[in-house]
């Protein structure tokens, strides 16, 4: 007997049996269970989960793995403006082909895919895809993670995950609360660049939304998807320390803010607060306590309302539309307080104000500069008074210091009333005479001693001569006619400070609402038309 031949045959049998134990056969796959078939397909002798599926083109070139993605959004939380983020609850599904898992020829009678959960997924190669703009994310699940894995007979692998993610979204708040926001969800390949793995959206309905999806503060207008390539270098380490081109997918939602809450809780109350501040225009200018209380209370109330609304927003460098509205309403409320301070100051004046014409321009001009108007209205009167005093001084100098000679002239006595016009000479025109001139002419402010008597005599003589010339005129106008002629020629009217204060309040009752209406016209036109 050839023992050497027998020993070699035994060794070969043991080697074959050892090989079968290390690499189980795929024969008679129809008789195997899903777990047994999967264990044999993913055995280490034929499957390496650390290596991606490798396919070749007709020319023998190594091809990248094509991964197809689909997203189903069933819940979206409102944008958190203060933190510039939003939350989504979604089902992410990826699909790719792994020829090593093809069991169509091994188990031809098995036409249904092999289904499993997280344990099955852990035994397979998976493309590492991450959310580029995430702040926090996790896979949902109670006792186990909500992961569904499916392997089709042709080797197609489908993995579905239910995730919760908090994503970063940069908000443009220039037109807040009438703003529209665009927030994106970005998916990128972590490990493999475009030469190894390429991401694609599914051709049919890549992004779908739950029909019951509703947002309390926003309305979902539309959404769109995009496929891009990210060029990463050593300055961008979000893909680790590897440089290259990485495939990226994104879908963007267009959200429009619902302004009903802000209209009812911010804009309409602020309009009413501004209107309440105008009530002070119907109060008398000297009623300081109620007008000050009303102005300060409305201003503080509006500031509290605006500050409560602004606490939910980030501190940005640009000006928002809500801040323009806040500034405009503050100016109107503060303007009503300034108007009260102005009319109260005028009310407490003691001197009347001469006004050239009864219109807004001249009343305001005379009110703002009453001394200047008074000087202009009496400039000619002071010039007449100075001339009369000069003449009386010259007359008294003729008598000398030591002489007491008096000249008595019998003239008809005529009473000169305040405002009476004395005509010096027809060729020189008509000259007006006010109270100062009359007092100077008749010496109603007598000086002590003989010098005052002489000056009074000279003034009386001059006044009497002028009166004689006036009486000899053919028209013979009396005092009342001369006074009416002075008013017609001058056009000046005197208003008391109280009348001016009430006139300003009456105008403010219309100017402030009209200006606020114009402000609203420009504001809402900018909001909805620009």
Image: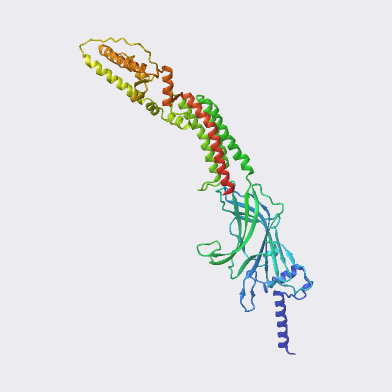
Q: Left or right of 327: which side holds 124?
A: right
Q: Left or right of 347: which side holds 474?
A: left
- Coloring applied to the structure: rainbow
Residue 311 can be seen in this image: no
Is 521 in front, or is 70?
Answer: 521
Where residue 287 appears, as percent x and y from the top left, is 52, 24
**In the image, residue 311 above or below residue 51:** above
Where residue 235 appears, as percent x and y from the top left, is 50, 62
Residue furthest to the front in view is: 474
Is 57 in front, or is 473?
Answer: 473
**In the image, residue 178 above or below residue 443:** below
**Location of residue 402 by image quarter:** top left
Is 433 in front, or is 333?
Answer: 433
Q: Left or right of 508: which side holds 91?
A: right
Residue 356 can be seen in this image: yes
Is 139 in front, or is 518?
Answer: 518
Where residue 425 appears, as percent x and y from the top left, is 33, 22
Counting the numbered discs, the total is: 0
Residue occupying image coordinates x 23% and y 10%: 405
**Location of residue 126 by image quarter:** bottom right
**In the image, residue 231 above or below residue 107:** above
Which image quadrant: the N terminus? bottom right
Q: Left or right of 308: which side holds 409?
A: left
Where residue 244 appears, as percent x and y from the top left, is 54, 67
């Amino acid at each position: 007997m050839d023992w050497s031949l027998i020993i070699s045959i035994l060794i070969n049998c043991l080697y074959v049996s050892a090989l079968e134990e290390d690499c189980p056969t795929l024969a008679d796959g129809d008789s195997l269970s899903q777990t047994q078939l999967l264990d044999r397909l993913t055995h280490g002798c034929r499957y390496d989960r650390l290596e991606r599926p490798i396919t070749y083109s007709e020319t023998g070139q190594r091809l990248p793995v094509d991964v197809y993605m689909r997203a189903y959004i069933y819940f979206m939380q409102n944008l958190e403006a203060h933190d510039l983020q939003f939350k989504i609850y979604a089902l992410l599904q990826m699909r790719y082909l792994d020829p090593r898992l093809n069991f169509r020829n091994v188990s031809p009678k098995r036409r249904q895919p092999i289904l499993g959960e997280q344990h099955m997924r852990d035994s397979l190669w998976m493309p590492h895809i991450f959310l580029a703009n995430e702040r926090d994310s996790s896979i949902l699940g109670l006792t186990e993670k909500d992961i569904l894995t499916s392997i089709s007979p042709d080797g197609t692998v489908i993995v579905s995950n239910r995730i919760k993610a908090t994503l970063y979204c940069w908000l443009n708040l220039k037109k807040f609360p009438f703003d529209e926001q665009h927030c994106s969800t970005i998916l990128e390949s972590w490990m493999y660049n475009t030469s190894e793995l390429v991401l694609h959206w599914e051709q049919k309905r890549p992004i779908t939304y739950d029909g019951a999806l509703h947002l309390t503060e926003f309305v979902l207008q539309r959404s769109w998807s995009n496929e891009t390539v990210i060029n990463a270098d050593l300055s961008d380490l979000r893909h680790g320390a590897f440089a290259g081109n990485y495939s990226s997918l994104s879908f963007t939602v267009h959200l429009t803010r619902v302004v009903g809450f802000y209209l009812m809780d911010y804009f309409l109350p602020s309009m009413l607060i501004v209107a309440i501040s105008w009530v002070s225009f119907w109060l008398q200018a000297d009623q300081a306590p109620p007008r000050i209380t009303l102005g300060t209370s409305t201003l503080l109330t509006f500031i509290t309302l605006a500050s409560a609304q602004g606490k939910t927003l980030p501190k940005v460098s640009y000006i928002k539309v809500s801040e323009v509205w806040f500034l405009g309403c503050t100016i109107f409320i503060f303007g009503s307080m300034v108007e009260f301070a102005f009319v109260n100051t005028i009310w407490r004046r003691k001197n009347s104000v001469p006004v050239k014409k009864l219109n807004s321009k001249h009343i305001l001009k005379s009110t703002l500069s009453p001394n200047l108007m008074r000087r202009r209205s009496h400039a000619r009167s002071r010039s007449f008074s100075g001339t009369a005093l000069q003449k009386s001084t010259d007359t008294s100098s003729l008598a000398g210091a030591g002489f007491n000679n008096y000249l008595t002239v019998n003239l008809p006595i005529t009473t000169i009333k305040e405002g009476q016009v004395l005509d010096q000479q027809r060729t020189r025109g008509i000259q007006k005479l006010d109270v100062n001139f009359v007092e100077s002419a008749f010496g109603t402010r007598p000086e002590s001693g003989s010098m005052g008597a002489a000056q009074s005599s000279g003034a009386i003589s001059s006044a009497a001569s002028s009166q004689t010339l006036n009486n000899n005129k053919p028209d013979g106008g009396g005092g009342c006619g001369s006074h009416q002629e002075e008013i017609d020629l001058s056009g000046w009217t005197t208003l008391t400070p109280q009348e001016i204060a009430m006139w300003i309040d009456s105008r403010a009752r219309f100017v402030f609402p009209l200006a606020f209406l114009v402000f609203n016209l420009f504001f809402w036109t900018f909001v909805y038309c620009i």
